[in-house]
């Protein structure tokens, strides 16, 4: 090979570099290192890659909350005010897609399930970093389960979620980015519950060994100590005033075009006293988002154009409202008296009685009056928002006072002495207490309307709104109540309602914690929930849960009333919004950015 | 030689100068009207407090017309139908095809006059087919005017009964403390201070929480009255005690003692009657506290319950800026509370001023 | 010599002022003979009213009996409980005050107030009470008892009021009346009448009277015994006639000359 002749360039001449330089070892080494350097630089994490759409980055989202978080420790504290915030900071191996309600990979990039459905192997992402730069790996997953969730010294409701048939899955590290879960019985919602947030081992290990975990990451913690993998990290918390979250520059997710997410720089939660204050703040422009009550619609809708916002109607909420009767035949061990007067228990236990009550719920008018026409009648235990598992084919009860009277007559409830009040076959006046929680004005209104109509039928109702804690103690400990108007949050995965529907369930409101099922239909519900959770084929599962909803609608342990409409108002400055019933407006917050013209 | 003067008690003298104060007399008349309205609520209101019609939710005040095409036909109203506009706002369409005359002394909802005599006679009303809402309807179509009248029964009576109870307790405690002095006075006054020390509203809540849940409405009413009196007696007791401390130095108290009268009789006959004139003014000034206390309890849902009306729970029904914007008439109960409180305050102040110089003259 | 209905032995009454104890009555010894009028005379501040109140155990709170015994028919009143003492007051020992306008409750009628005493100490009731009040008022020399009965204290003249007060004091028929300056606020003519009334009480009703006054000249015609008080101490005592004729103590002499007010 002929040695290359250096071009006779004036620059080189000026530099006076000898010819021999270019062929020397030193030069080859330098070129070699330079090539290595370039290849290394090409793999640098694009932490400041505002490359594809630089104009999308920046700005803030201002939201409100009506209560302070109780803690930032996601394991210990699960109430809404805490999980609202920790949802930004921590992530799980899976995530539920708010659009199609399917589970998708998140911190785990893929998984495999054994043919017997009992062994799950998760392959973790390798590009996830904790806020402090440490690498996320299998150790963190194993730590979160074995040291935190399964730790009996740590009070957490997550343990109940992972207790399947009395046992918890075995969690083992296979290698740095592979984790194995071994279940003792099949569990259909397993991928769903694997959205459980993972916490950092390197940061929290010491607190567990020192038995300090229960007090770690409380509300007075320095925000910089709270380490997660999520799109946002805690920047500042001023109790009673605001919570500020900041963009995580190390976040692993990218947009479809390759932008590193999230786009929005800051999320600010203003802590306000009441919904009215929130409304005022929205009207004056200080906040970007407002969840509407039915009555707010008339006020806000006309202002949409002028005030530059849009109201999204995302369909029915999944929080139910119902009236239920106490069917508990038990005896109070302290007083040796039955929880419910046996005479009244005999009324409530008659199916015709409950059916009559169902026919007396004027759902149309309740929606008109209480929700300002922005609501939906509810007939089924799983609401429309549940999507796939919602059974629309259940028994419907229309508002029919005549029919109700007939049913009552059939069951022996007649006004024999014409005093305006029905009596049972023994001559006892139909009279009972109706409770609800005083602080929920909508529920109080619903209860008042139901009460009025029941009185039209000829029943005597003693309506008494109670303070929430008193109501809860009646439901959970003293069991001394007769009829209650209450509500429960709903969901997409039917198994999570097991607490309510299984006869041994704590939330089996009308007759909780049964030792053996009291009725044949409750026995069937137990079976359904045991079988449904182990059936991994979705369509086969649907058959079970459709039956459960049909039973509930037929036997009416809970008599459903109405659902609110999910309405939110959002300023028009946000792009990429995709509001869904399940996810609300900001389920895809990382992908949302502020429009150019609003900067 | 004796002066042949007509006996005029100091209270009557005070009353005379009270009558000269026009503002106070005006307030007294307002209260008289309110109380009269409360007593005859059944008759004066077009509808019972429970009469609801869901098809008239938040119906605005019904315009009463007098002329039809320029001709005088007497008072009448048109029927209304509820519709929702594009913004889901309630809009009532007037049906001008049929007139419903507003009549006096009509037959309406049944009630028992003064709790005893059944009757169906109402002062005003219209026949079936239209609803007469003098100041508008609430969320369930109940007539607000009727409910205000019924609400007066509860709100105004709570004030009177409550103050009667506090007054009695305060007089006795204050009288005993002031008369005996010493350790009895000490103990009783420390007790007063302990009660006064607890922030009134929280004491109210704590006591309300202690009320058994299965009380019916009447029992809750009395429980609320008792609770409110429990809060109020301490202030009165202290004032009475102060007055008694000085009154017991009066010579006629010494004379009464020298005559061997029992302490109880001395307190009752010779000391307390001299505090009554001041107490009445104090009582007038404290009645508003009861009315507002009941309203406060109702606003948080712990007061008088649906379907019974009290001015407090009428306000609490719809405490939201949106409702107030679209149905501003729901604030009327607030106006009544305001007028009542102001009237009691003015009357109390004026009475106190009128009685004061009398007391000074009496001491000579 | 009459036996003593009341014996005051070594009575010492003190008051605590700014950590200093001042003696208002200092070692007073006095025997009050039954059915006689005994006068206790001294200038203001001499302790005479205090003595009167001490007998009834009605001393103001700041004052206290430091020493001494008050023996009533053999029993030391100091040893009685408050309840027992209350039974004595009005029933056994009565008091007439200086200013009846103050001593009557202005808001009740005379009849009501005398009636109270009767209800407390006697078993009378209803119309019998009114009859008794009329009788009492007549006894004390009131002309139109029914009208007085229904009158308020301020409606009466000074003299009538004083009579009414005396009527009230004797209503329960006490054996001893303590009259504290009963005529000081009345004019001279009325004084004579009231003194006459006391004489009547002593002679006709057989009452014993302890007359407290600053005016030696006024009591000299009425009282059999007199004791002179000065600065809490008894300086002289004995038969009125001899004291008046031969006052030994300079203070007594002063009183006689009415130069002390």
Image (tube, coloured by chain):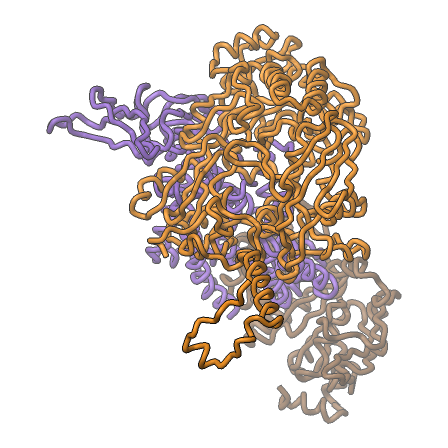
Q: Nearer the viewer, residue B23 or B304?
A: B304
Q: Nearer the viewer, residue C160 or B15?
A: B15
Q: Colour of chain C?
A: brown
Q: Residue furthest left?
A: B70
Which chain is represented by purple in the image?
Answer: B
> Image height check: is A183 above or below A420?
below
Q: Nearer the viewer, residue B358 or A163?
A: A163
Q: Residue furthest top?
A: A410
**Residue C75 placement (x, y as % from top left):** 87, 65
> Image height check: is B232 above or below A14?
above
Q: Residue furthest bottom?
A: C250
Q: Residue furthest front?
A: A2
**Residue A565 placement (x, y as % from top left):** 45, 32
Q: Relative to residue A104, is residue A117 drawn left or right?
A: right
Q: Colour of chain A?
A: orange
**Residue B124 placement (x, y as % from top left):** 31, 27
- Residue at image position (60%, 19%) is A539
Q: Nearer the viewer, residue A316 or C132?
A: A316
Q: Relative to residue C53, is residue B65 drawn left or right?
A: left
> Image height check: is C36 above or below A265?
below
> Image height check: is A324 above or below C44?
above
- Residue at image position (74%, 49%) is A139
Q: Quadrant of residue C32?
A: bottom right
Q: Relative to residue C194, is residue B98 drawn left or right?
A: left
Q: Is residue C170 visible?
A: no
- Residue at image position (65%, 28%) is A497
**Residue A530 placement (x, y as % from top left):** 72, 22
Q: Quadrant of residue B50?
A: top left
Count of picture labels:
0
Q: Is residue C124 visible?
A: yes
């Amino acid at each position: 090979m002929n040695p290359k002749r250096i071009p006779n360039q004036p620059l080189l001449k000026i530099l006076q570099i000898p010819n021999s330089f270019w062929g020397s070892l030193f030069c080859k080494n330098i070129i070699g290192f330079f090539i290595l350097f370039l290849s290394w630089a090409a793999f640098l994490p694009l932490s400041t890659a505002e490359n594809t759409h630089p104009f999308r980055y920046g700005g803030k989202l201002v939201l409100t909350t009506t209560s302070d978080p109780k803690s930032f420790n996601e394991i210990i504290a699960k109430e809404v005010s805490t999980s609202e915030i920790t949802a930004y900071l921590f992530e799980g191996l899976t995530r539920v897609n708010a659009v199609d309600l399917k589970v998708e990979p998140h911190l785990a990039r893929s998984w495999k399930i054994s043919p017997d459905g009992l062994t799950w192997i998760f392959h973790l992402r390798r590009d996830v970093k904790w806020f402090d730069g440490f690498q996320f790996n299998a150790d963190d997953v194993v730590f979160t389960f074995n040291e935190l969730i399964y730790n009996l010294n740590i009070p957490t409701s997550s343990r109940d979620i992972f207790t399947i048939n009395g046992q918890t899955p075995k969690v083992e590290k296979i290698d740095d980015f592979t984790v194995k879960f071994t279940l003792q019985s099949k569990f259909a919602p397993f991928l769903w519950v694997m959205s459980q947030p993972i916490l950092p081992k390197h940061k929290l290990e010491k607190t567990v060994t020192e038995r300090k975990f229960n007090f770690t990451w409380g509300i007075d913690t320095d925000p910089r100590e709270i380490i997660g993998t999520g799109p946002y990290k805690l920047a500042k918390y001023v109790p009673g005033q605001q919570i500020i979250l900041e963009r995580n520059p190390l976040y692993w997710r990218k947009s479809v075009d390759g932008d590193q997410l999230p786009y929005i720089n800051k999320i600010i939660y203003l802590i306000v006293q009441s919904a009215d204050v929130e409304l005022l703040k929205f009207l004056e422009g200080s906040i970007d988002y407002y969840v509407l009550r039915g009555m707010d619609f008339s006020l806000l809708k006309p202002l949409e154009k002028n005030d530059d916002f849009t109201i999204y109607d995302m369909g029915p909420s999944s929080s139910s409202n119902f009236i239920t009767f106490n069917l508990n035949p038990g005896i109070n061990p302290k007083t040796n008296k039955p929880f419910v007067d046996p005479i009244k228990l005999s009324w409530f236990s008659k199916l015709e009685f409950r059916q009559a009550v169902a026919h007396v719920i004027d759902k149309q008018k309740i929606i008109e009056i209480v929700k300002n026409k922005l609501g939906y009648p509810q007939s089924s235990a799983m609401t429309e928002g549940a999507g796939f598992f919602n059974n629309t084919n259940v028994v419907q009860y229309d508002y029919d006072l005549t029919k109700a009277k007939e049913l009552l007559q059939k069951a022996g409830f007649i006004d024999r002495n014409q005093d305006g009040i029905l009596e049972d076959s023994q001559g006892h006046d139909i009279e009972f207490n109706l409770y609800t929680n005083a602080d929920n004005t909508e529920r109080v209104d619903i209860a008042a309307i139901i009460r009025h109509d029941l009185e039209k039928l000829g029943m005597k109702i003693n309506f008494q709104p109670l303070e929430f804690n008193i109501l809860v103690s009646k439901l959970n400990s003293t069991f001394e109540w007769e009829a209650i108007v209450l509500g429960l949050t709903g969901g997409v995965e039917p198994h999570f309602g097991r607490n309510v529907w299984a006869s041994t369930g704590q939330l089996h409101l009308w007759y909780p914690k049964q030792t053996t099922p009291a009725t044949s239909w409750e026995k069937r519900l137990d079976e359904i929930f045991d079988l449904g959770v182990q059936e991994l084929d979705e369509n086969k599962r649907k058959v079970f849960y459709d039956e459960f909803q049909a039973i509930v609608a037929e036997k009416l342990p809970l008599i459903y009333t109405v659902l609110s409409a999910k309405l939110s108002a959002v300023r028009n400055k946000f792009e990429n919004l995709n509001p869904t019933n399940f996810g609300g407006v900001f389920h895809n917050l990382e992908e949302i950015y502020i429009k150019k013209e609003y900067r | 030689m004796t002066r042949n003067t007509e006996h005029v008690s100091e209270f009557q003298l005070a009353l005379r100068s009270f009558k000269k104060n026009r503002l106070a007399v005006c307030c007294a008349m307002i209260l008289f009207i309110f109380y009269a309205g409360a007593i005859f609520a059944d008759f004066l209101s077009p509808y019972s407090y429970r009469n609801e019609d869901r098809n008239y939710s938040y119906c605005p005040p019904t315009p009463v017309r007098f002329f039809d095409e320029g001709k005088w036909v007497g008072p009448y109203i048109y029927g209304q139908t509820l519709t929702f506009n594009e913004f889901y706002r309630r809009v009532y369409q007037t049906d001008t095809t049929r007139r419903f005359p507003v009549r006096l002394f009509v037959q309406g909802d049944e009630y028992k006059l003064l709790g005893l005599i059944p009757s169906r006679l109402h002062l005003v009303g219209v026949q079936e087919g239209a609803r007469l809402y003098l100041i508008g309807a609430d969320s369930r179509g109940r007539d607000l005017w009727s409910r205000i009248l019924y609400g007066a029964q509860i709100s105004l009576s709570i004030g009177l009964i409550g103050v009667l109870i506090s007054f009695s307790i305060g007089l006795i405690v204050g009288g005993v403390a002031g008369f005996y002095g010493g350790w009895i006075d000490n103990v009783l006054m420390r007790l007063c201070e302990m009660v006064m020390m607890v922030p009134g509203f929280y004491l109210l809540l704590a006591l309300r929480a202690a009320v058994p849940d299965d009380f019916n409405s009447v029992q809750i009413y009395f429980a609320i009255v008792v609770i409110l009196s429990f809060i109020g007696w301490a202030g009165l007791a202290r004032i009475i005690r102060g007055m008694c401390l000085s009154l017991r130095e009066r010579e006629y108290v010494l004379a009464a003692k020298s005559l061997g009268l029992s302490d109880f009789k001395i307190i009752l006959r010779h000391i307390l009657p001299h505090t009554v004139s001041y107490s009445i003014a104090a009582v007038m000034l404290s009645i508003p506290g009861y009315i507002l206390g009941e309203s406060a309890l109702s606003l948080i849902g712990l007061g008088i319950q649906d379907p019974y009306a009290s001015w407090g729970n009428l306000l609490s029904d719809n405490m939201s800026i949106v409702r107030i914007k679209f149905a501003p008439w729901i604030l009327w109960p607030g106006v009544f509370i305001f007028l009542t409180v102001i009237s009691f305050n003015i009357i109390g102040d004026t009475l106190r001023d009128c009685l004061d110089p009398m007391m000074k003259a009496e001491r000579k | 010599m009459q036996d003593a209905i009341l014996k005051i032995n070594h009575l010492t009454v003190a008051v605590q002022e700014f950590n200093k104890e001042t003696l208002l009555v200092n070692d007073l010894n006095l025997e009050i003979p039954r059915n006689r009028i005994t006068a206790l005379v001294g200038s203001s501040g001499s302790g005479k009213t205090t003595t009167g109140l001490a007998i009834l155990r009605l001393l103001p709170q700041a004052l206290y009996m430091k020493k001494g015994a008050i023996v009533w028919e053999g029993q030391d009143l100091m040893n009685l409980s408050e309840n027992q003492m209350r039974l004595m007051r009005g029933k056994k020992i009565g008091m007439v005050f200086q200013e009846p306008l103050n001593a009557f409750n202005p808001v009740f009628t005379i009849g009501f107030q005398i009636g109270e005493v009767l209800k407390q100490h006697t078993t009378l009731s209803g119309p019998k009470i009114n009859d008794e009040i009329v009788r009492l008022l007549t006894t004390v020399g009131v002309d139109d008892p029914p009208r007085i009965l229904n009158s308020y204290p301020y409606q009466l003249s000074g003299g009538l009021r004083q009579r009414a007060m005396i009527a009230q004091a004797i209503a329960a028929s006490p054996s001893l009346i303590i009259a504290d300056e009963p005529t000081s606020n009345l004019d001279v003519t009325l004084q004579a009448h009231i003194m006459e009334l006391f004489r009547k009480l002593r002679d006709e009703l057989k009452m014993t009277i302890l007359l407290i006054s600053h005016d030696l000249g006024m009591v000299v015609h009425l009282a059999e015994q007199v004791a002179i008080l000065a600065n809490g101490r008894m300086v002289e005592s004995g038969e009125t006639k001899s004291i008046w004729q031969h006052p030994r103590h300079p203070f007594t002499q002063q009183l006689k000359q009415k130069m002390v007010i």
